[in-house]
Image (cartoon, rainbow, N blue to C red):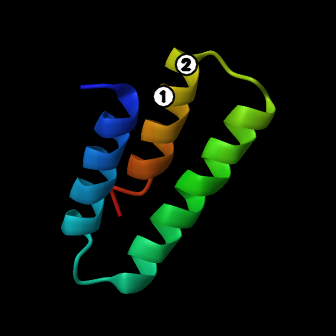
């Protein structure tokens, strides 16, 4: 399984986790996309990009 597939699975699980809160789902997807774009603009290496995207997806899990 490649890193993109892992990120997709993590995103799906976070959507499932927040299934009763569409605003939180929209927020987590927006934060992820913004983090993804910043990482690409900064030309992060693949591993760091992966970590940034994963962190962006789970950053609000404690709320």
Q: Height in image: 16 above or below 49?
A: below
Q: How many marks?
A: 2
- Residue at the image position 48 percent from the left and 28 percent from the top: 50
Residue ID for mark 1: 50
Disc 2 is placed on an element classified as helix
Mark 2 to mark 1: distance in Å? 6 Å
The residue at which mark 2 appears reads as: 46
Can you say whether 5 is above or below 9 in the image?
above
Residue at image coords 32%, 83%: 21
Q: Residue furthest right?
A: 41
Quarter of the image for the C terminus: give it: bottom left
At x 38% / y 48%, what residue is drawn? 58
Q: Is residue 45 left or right of residue 60?
A: right
Q: Give residue 33's position: percent from left, percent from top.
A: 59, 55
Task: Give the quarter of the figure containing the N terminus.
Answer: top left
Please indicate whether residue 18 sits to the left or right of residue 59 in the image. Answer: left
Q: Secondary structure at mark 1?
A: helix
Residue 37 is left or right of residue 30, and the answer is right
Q: Position of residue 34 (x, y in %)?
A: 66, 54
Towards the viewer: 10 or 4: 4
Of residues 42 and 62, the one nearer the viewer is: 42
Q: Where does the image place residue 25, in percent across and percent down from the top left?
A: 39, 72
40 sits to left or right of 14 = right
On residue 4, which mark appears? none
Q: Quadrant of residue 41?
A: top right
Relative height, residue 5 to residue 22 (above, below): above
The residue depicted at 69 percent of the width and 34 percent of the height is: 39
**Image x and y of residue 7, in percent:** 36, 41
Which of 9/54 is in front?
9
Crowd band around label 2 with a 10 angstrom C-alpha radius: few (<14), some (14–19), many (20+) = few
Question: Is mark 2 in CB contact (under 8 Å) with mark 1?
Answer: yes
Disc 1 crowd rating (10 Å Cα; few below 14, some 14-19, many 20+) is some
């Amino acid at each position: 399984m490649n890193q993109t597939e892992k990120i997709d699975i993590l995103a799906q699980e976070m959507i499932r986790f927040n299934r009763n809160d569409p605003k939180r789902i929209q927020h987590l997807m927006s934060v992820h996309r913004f983090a993804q774009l910043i990482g690409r603009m900064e030309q992060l290496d693949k591993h760091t990009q992966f970590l940034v995207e994963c962190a962006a997806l789970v950053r609000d899990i404690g709320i």
